[in-house]
Image (tube, rainbow, N blue to C red):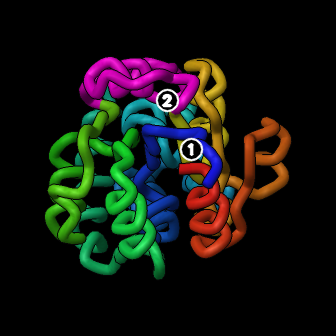
Amino acid sequence: MPSPEFDLVVFDWDGTLMDSTPTITRCIQAACRDLGLPVPTDELASHVIGLGLRDALQMAVPSLDPSHYPRLSERYRFHYLIGDKETVLFPGVRELLDELRSRGRFLAVATGKSRVGLNRALESAGLMRMFDATRCADETFSKPHPAMLQELTRELGQDLRRTVMIGDTTHDLQMARSAGAAGVGVAYGGAHPRDQLVALEPAYCAGTVAELRDWLLERV
C-alpha cells in the first residue's frame, strides 16, 4: 500500500461539508432588503461566502458606510438563524469523515463562520467531537490569509506540506497556496463555479462528494 500523502485534512464548512450556500445567499439579500440597500445578485452574494462576515458584507455591498456594518450583520444573523434549520450535510459527508477518522488522520475545519456559528452547526450535525481542531474568522485573519492553516498545523504539530485544504471557493484555494498546503476544490457547493476553482490549479477539483472521497482515500 503506498505511503499516504496527507496527515491533516482541513475542510471548509459552508458549501463543502454543509449544503448551506443557497441559504447564505438568500440571507445576505434579505438583510440588504431590510435596510433598503442595493440587493446583490445571486452570483455576488454567493461569491463572498467563506470570508469573515464583515469582509463578506463589505464586498457584497461596497457602497455601504462602514458605520452601518453592525446593522447589516444583525439583519443577516436574524435571517440566518431562521433558515439555519434548513441546512444539512451533503449526502456522503458523514461517511467520508468517519472513514478518514478510522484511518487515524487529523481532521480540522477552517471557516468564515463565527465561533458561535460553527459550534452551533457542529452541534446540530452531531459532529462536535469529529474534528481535532477548528478555526473561525472571528478568531484570526479571514481567508484567503494563510493564518488559519498555519495556526491549525502548529496546534496539531503537523507539516503544511502534508496538509490538504478542501473548499468550494477560490478563497480556500488561495489560502492553501499562500500557506504552502495542497488545495482541493469542490464544485458541488455552488459558491464559486468550477472554472474559477480550476484556474487556481488545485491538486484536484471534485464534482461530487463521492469523487472527493475516492481521491482522498487514495492519499491518506
Name the amino acid type tagged 2: Lys
Closer to us: mark 1 or mark 2? 1
- Asked if residue 14 lies in the magenta stretch, the reply is no
Going from N to C along the chain, the mark reached first, 1 or 2, is 1
In the picture, measured across the screen, residue 20 lies left or right of residue 206, that is: left
The region drawn magenta spans: 138-162
Name the amino acid type tagged 1: Pro
Residue 37, image x and y in percent? 48, 48
Q: Residues within 10 Å of mark 2 (few under 14, many from 20)?
A: many
**Residue 145 visible in this rendered orientation of the protein:** yes
Of 41 and 17, which appears nearest the observer? 17
Point out which mark residue 4 bears.
1
- Asked if residue 158 lies in the magenta stretch, the reply is yes
* Residue 164, placed above or below residue 158: below
Q: Residue at x 64, y 29 (%)?
A: 174
Distance of label 1 from label 2 (alpha carbons): 27 Å
Residue 78, image x and y in percent? 22, 60
Image marks 1 and 2: residues in contact by CB distance under 8 Å: no
Q: Residue at x 40, y 75 (%)?
A: 95
Query: Which residue is outermost to the front?
Result: 1
In the picture, measured across the screen, residue 142 lies left or right of residue 114, that is: right
Point out which mark residue 106 bears.
none
Element class at badge 2 = loop
In the picture, measured across the screen, residue 202 lies left or right of residue 60, that is: right
Q: Residues within 10 Å of mark 1 (few under 14, many from 20)?
A: few
Of 99 and 194, which appears nearest the observer? 99
Q: Residue at x 26, y 49 (%)?
A: 131
**Residue under circle 2?**
143
Element class at badge 1 = loop
Of 2 and 99, which appears nearest the observer? 2
Residue 30, image x and y in percent? 41, 63
